[in-house]
Amino acid sequence: MPERRDLANAIRILSMDAVQQANSGHPGMPMGMADIAEVLFNDHLKYNPANPEWLDRDRFLLSNGHGSMLQYAALHLTGYDVSLDDIKAFRQLHSKTPGHPENFMTPGVETTTGPLGQGLGNAVGMALAEASLAADFNVSDESVVDHHTYCFAGDGCLMEGISHEACSLAGTLGLGKLVVFYDDNGISIDGETEGWFTEDVPARFKAYGWQVIADVDGHDAGEIDAAIREAKADADRPTIICCKTVIGWGAPNMKGTAKVHGAALGDDEISAARKELGWSDETRFAVPEALYEAWDHRQAGKQAEAAWQQRYDRFASSHPDLAAEFDRRLDNRFPGNWADQARTFIEKTQADGKRTATRKSSKAALGAFSNVLPELFGGSADLTGSNGTDFDGYQPISAADKSGNYVCYGVREFGMSAITNGLSLHGGLVPFGATFLTFSDYARNAVRMAALMQARNVFVYTHDSIGLGEDGPTHQAVEHVAALRLIPNLHVWRPGDDVETAVAWRAAIERVNGPCAIALSRQDTDHHERDADTVAAIDKGGYVLVDTKDTPDAIVIGTGTELELAVNAARKLADDGVAVRVVSMPCIEVFASQDAGYRDSVLPPNVTARVAVEAGVSDSWYRFVGATGEVVGVDDFGLSAPAEEVYAEFGVTVDGVVQAIKRQL
Amino acid sequence: MPERRDLANAIRILSMDAVQQANSGHPGMPMGMADIAEVLFNDHLKYNPANPEWLDRDRFLLSNGHGSMLQYAALHLTGYDVSLDDIKAFRQLHSKTPGHPENFMTPGVETTTGPLGQGLGNAVGMALAEASLAADFNVSDESVVDHHTYCFAGDGCLMEGISHEACSLAGTLGLGKLVVFYDDNGISIDGETEGWFTEDVPARFKAYGWQVIADVDGHDAGEIDAAIREAKADADRPTIICCKTVIGWGAPNMKGTAKVHGAALGDDEISAARKELGWSDETRFAVPEALYEAWDHRQAGKQAEAAWQQRYDRFASSHPDLAAEFDRRLDNRFPGNWADQARTFIEKTQADGKRTATRKSSKAALGAFSNVLPELFGGSADLTGSNGTDFDGYQPISAADKSGNYVCYGVREFGMSAITNGLSLHGGLVPFGATFLTFSDYARNAVRMAALMQARNVFVYTHDSIGLGEDGPTHQAVEHVAALRLIPNLHVWRPGDDVETAVAWRAAIERVNGPCAIALSRQDTDHHERDADTVAAIDKGGYVLVDTKDTPDAIVIGTGTELELAVNAARKLADDGVAVRVVSMPCIEVFASQDAGYRDSVLPPNVTARVAVEAGVSDSWYRFVGATGEVVGVDDFGLSAPAEEVYAEFGVTVDGVVQAIKRQL
C-alpha cells in the first residue's frame, strides 16, 4: 500500500509535468493543495467516476481555478474519462484540459472557475440547491438527496468581495453541508500577502456564523482527515477549514514563493522536485501502477451509487408520485401541462390587454408559471417588491425552513448571481435572481459565466432606463441593455408590453442551455393589439407589430417602453400619408438567429429609411439601421427628475421619433 | 440655545418635507441618522461652507446615498450654497438636489453615491490620499495636510462585497483617519435584516484590524460625541462606529419598518411626526431662526480655514519649493516641462520602433511620465508584473510608510477602482489601477461612476483579447472593450503599438475631467512607421496610418494588436493591385468628437467598401462600416490554447482580413 504522501505526489508530478509541457499554467496551487485533495478524494468525497452526472454525488469545486491541474490529475487518477493523453494536452486547443476548469469540457468538472471568488458563490448555490431539494423530497426515511459540497479557495478568492457576500449569506442560511478549504499559503501573485491581506480569516468567518477549523496543517493527512470529519459533523453551519500550506510544496528552490504560482518550474527544478519528493521515475507523466491502483475509485464509486440507487428504489416504491416528480425535475423535463398552460396564460394576457409596467407583467407571469413549475426558484437582492418577484406563491426560505422557493439575498448582486449559477449547475431548480438593471454591473462577470457555462439562469432586471425617474443617473440604466447584449450566448429580452413579457419569461424558462436577462420597466406602458400569428411571432425575437398596406416608406424598430413611441409615431405619420412599419425587437440575439428569409421579411433590405428607438445608448442598432440610419436613444447619463421630464429632455418622445423618420425619408 | 435634538430634528423636518413634496425619495435614513449628523457637523467636522474646495477640509461621504436629504439638509443648515428653494426642488430636473448625491451638482458633496458600498471605497481612497499627501508634504512642524474622512454607511453597504475589499485593505494600510458610521437599524428594503444579514459586524471589522466602537446609541448625542473622540484618538487604525438607530426616527407609526425607507410618509404621518418631535410649526420647510443660527457654520468655518491658512503660510515661507509643488499638484496643474518631456518620449518611442507587447510599452511610458509627474499614483489588483505597472520608480506604500506612489491592492478589482475614484476626487494625485481586461467586469460600476463623476482615473487593462492564449475563455476578454465603450464619458483606448500606447497614456493623464481605460496586449505586436504629422494625428483617436495614392478601393480599420493584421492585409492586397487605406482607431470616442470634416477625411463617405478588424465582439464597428460592411472579430467566447492558434481558429488573421476586403469590393 503506497504512503498517502506518494498518492499526493502523483498530483504534484502530473501538475508540474503538464505545466512544463504546455509551458504555461500554475503549478504552485496543485503542489500546495495535493495532500488535501488526496484525503478528500480518497477518503471522503462521494462520487462515481463512471457517472459524473449521478445526482446525489458530492460536489467538488475549485474556486481557485488556476489550480486546474490539481483537478485534472485527481479526475485522471480516480478513473474519470480524463486520460493521460488528455493531461498531456493541457491548455491545448479543444482539449479536455483547458487552462481553467470548464464544466462543459471535462467530465467531473462541476463549474467553470478562474475569475476568483465565484467558485465559492457557485458552491453556496450548490449547497443551497441540495438543502432545497432535500426539503422537498426527503420525506421518507430514505434520503434521496444527501450530499456535501466541497470547495477549494485561495487567498485571492477570500480577498474578492464576492466571498463576503456569498459566505455571509451561507452563514445566515445555515448551509451545514458546505465545506470550504482555505489554502492559506501566504502568497499571491504580487508576493507575500502580508502587504495587502492581513485580515484574521478565522475571525471573519466566525463573524459570519461559520464553523471555523483553524490552523490545520495542509500537508498532514491526519489533521486534514480530522478536520473533514469535524466539518461533516456540524449539520447546521457551513465549515471553513483553514489549511496552512506551502505553495509549490515539493519544489525545493521555488516553494513558498510567488515564482511557483503561475509559470512552469523548468527542467532543473522539476528534476530537483522529483528528488525532493522521492519520486524515482524521471519520465515525464509516469505514475507507478501501484499509485494508480490505490487512487482508482471506480469500484468504490460504483458501490456508492448502487447504495444510493437502493435507497432511491425504496423511495420510488413508497412514494411513486414524488419520485416521478423528482425524476422529472432532475432530468430537466417540463410537466406535461406546461406548454398548454404557458400558451393559455399568454393568450389570456393578450386578450386582457393591460397598460401596465412590464415589471408587473413579469410578476403576473411568474405567478402563473411557477404554479406549473415548482422548480422555479427565485430571489432578489433586497428589492423584492420593486422587482415584482414576490409572485403569487413565493415563499422565502430560512435557516430553519428550506422548503420555500425564494431567497432574500440581501444587497448582494454578485453573490446572488454566482449562487444562482450554482443552483442551476446543481440541477433540479430553475433559478432566477432580480435587481435593478443598473446593478447588473455589480454582477456582470457572473452573468458572463452563466453564458460561458451554458447554464439556465434568468437575470431579472427591473427599472430598466431613464424611466426610473427621480433616483437619477446612478440608478438609470442607459448602457446596460446594450452592454448585456455583447455577452456571447446571453439572450437579452426587453419586452414591450404585458404579452411580450410573458413570452420572454417562457423563452427564458425553456432555454435550457443558456441564460437570459429580462429588462423590465418601472413605469407603465401600452398594451399592443396582436392576432394569433403575431403573438406567435414574438418568439422569433423580432417581428412586424404594425404593418403598412404596401411597401413601407420607412421602418421603425422599438423595444421595451419605447415600443409605444414607435407605434404612436407610425400612427401620426400615417395621418400625414407616410407608411411606416413598426418592428418590435424584444430580443436581438433570437432575431439574429432566425434564417435570412425571415429576417429580410421583417427588415426588407430595400427599405433603407430606418429608425430605432430605445431609451439607452444607440450602439446596438447600427447593424439594423445602417450607418445612414438614425437611433433615437440616450447617449449620455440620465438625470434626476420625474420620468416624463427626463424622456422629454433627451428627446425620446413620439415627436422625436417622427422627426427622425422624416429625416430618413 | 436650542437642544441638540431640536437641531437634529431640523434635518428630519426638511427631509420628510422634501420627500413629500417630490413624492419620491428616502426619509427613513435621514430621520434615523439625523442625530449622528448633527453631532458630526456641529462639533467635529472641519469645513468652511464658503469654500467647499478648501483642500484641508474633512471629507464627508454618504455611502448610503439614498439618504441624500440628510446631506442636503446639513449643507443648507450649515451655510453652503444650498438654498431652501434648492431643498424644495429635491429630485427635480437640473436641481442642486438630485435623488442621490452628485459631486458635480452640489457644493459640499464630495462624491456621487447610490450604488451601495462604493462610497465606502471612495472614503478609503480619500483617506489614503490624505495619508499619501501628508507623507509627501508634512515635512515641517506645520502639517498642511491633516484631515479626517468620515463616511456614513448602511446595512446595504456592508452587505455589498466591495465593503469587504475596501475595508480589509484599509485595515491593512492602517488608515487611522478614516471614520465610518454604521447605521445599524436592522431594516433593509425587504424588511427586517435578520433574515439575510446576521453576521457580527463588529467582529468582522475587528478581523480587518479596525478599531471597533460597538453598541453606540445613534440617538444619544453624548455617546456619539464620545465615540467620535475615541475614533480620532486612534491614529493607526480606521474606526467603525456601530450606531444602533431607528430608521425613520420621529415618524410615530412607521419608524423602525421598511415602510419608511423609500417612500414619502404622507401628510398624516408628517403631522404626527411633527407632534412626536415637538415641532410646533406645521408649515412645510419652516425651520425656526434660532435653529438656523445654531447650525450656521460660516463663521466657524472661516476661522478654521484661516487657522490652516496661517499654517500653510508658515510652511510656504519655510519650504517655498515644496509649497510650490504642493500648490501645483492640488491645483491640478502640470509641471512646466511636462509637455516637452511627454512629446520627447513619444518621438523617441517612434524613432526606436520596437515590436513588443503594448503592456510593456505602457510600462515604459509610465516610467517616463512618472518621472515628470510625481502625482502619478498607481496600483494593481495583484497582477503588478503582468500588468507592467512596476514601472521604473514605483514604490509600494505600507501601513508603516506611506511615502510611496503605488498600492498593492490585492485581488480586489472593485475595491481598487472605487478607491482610485476616491484618490482622484480628493485631489493631489493622478491615480491608475490595473488588472486583466476581463476583470474590468468585477469593477464595472466603479468605472461607470468615474465617468459619471467626471473623475480623472486611468483604468489599465492588460491581456486584452484572445491573445491571452492558454488561460482560456474565462480570461480572454472578447466583449469588454466594446462594453467599456458604451459607458458615457469614458474614453477607451486600445493602442496598436508602442507609440500609440505612449500617446494614449498622455491623453489619459491630460484628461482632467473624466476617466480613460487603456486596453493593452499580453503579446507582442508590430511597431508602425509614421511621420511627425501622423504621430500627431494619433491624438485625434482615429487617423490614416497607411494611405493609398489615389482614392482607396477599400478602407480597413484596425485597433490594438489587430492593427498589424490590417497593415499586412493592405500590403498583400496592394500586391494584387487593390488600394486599401489603413485607418488606426485607438479611441472611438475621441475620433467621434472630431469635426465632420476631419472624420470624413479619414473615412470618406464615398468609400463604402469597409472592413474593421478587432479581436472582440463586432458591435462597435457597424456605425463605421455600415450595415453592409464587414467586421473581422470574435463573436463568441474564446478558447484555451496558444494565442496564435486561437487567432487562427477564429479567422482573425491577415488572410481573414484580405478575404473580408475582397468580399467588400
Image (tube, coloured by chain):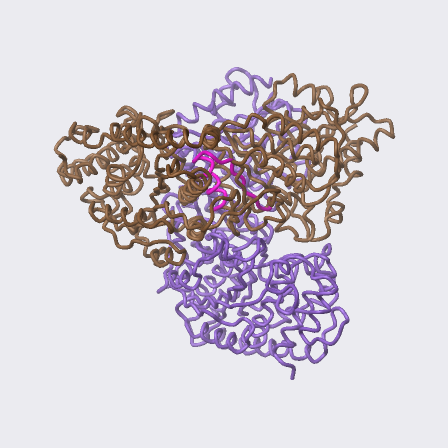
Chain colours: A brown, B purple
The reply, left or right, for residue A396 in relation to residue B15 is left
Q: How many marks?
A: 0
When the figure is inspected, residue B571 is found, relative to residue B3, above or below; the finding is above
Q: Residue B142 location, x and y as percent?
A: 46, 76
Looking at this view, is A385 or A450 the one in front? A385
Residue B233 place in picture, x, y as percent: 43, 75
B250 or B657: nearer the viewer: B250
* Relative horizontal placement of residue A580, taking residue A140 as reference (left or right): right
Q: Quadrant of residue A340?
A: top right
- Does residue A428 belong to the magenta stretch? yes
Residue placed furthest toward the top: B576
Span shown in magenta: A415-437
Q: Position of residue B73 (x, y in %)?
A: 66, 68
Quick check: can you spot residue A550?
yes
The vertical placement of B53 against B508, above or below, is below
Residue B17 magenta: no
From what the image shows, is residue A86 above or below residue B71? Answer: above
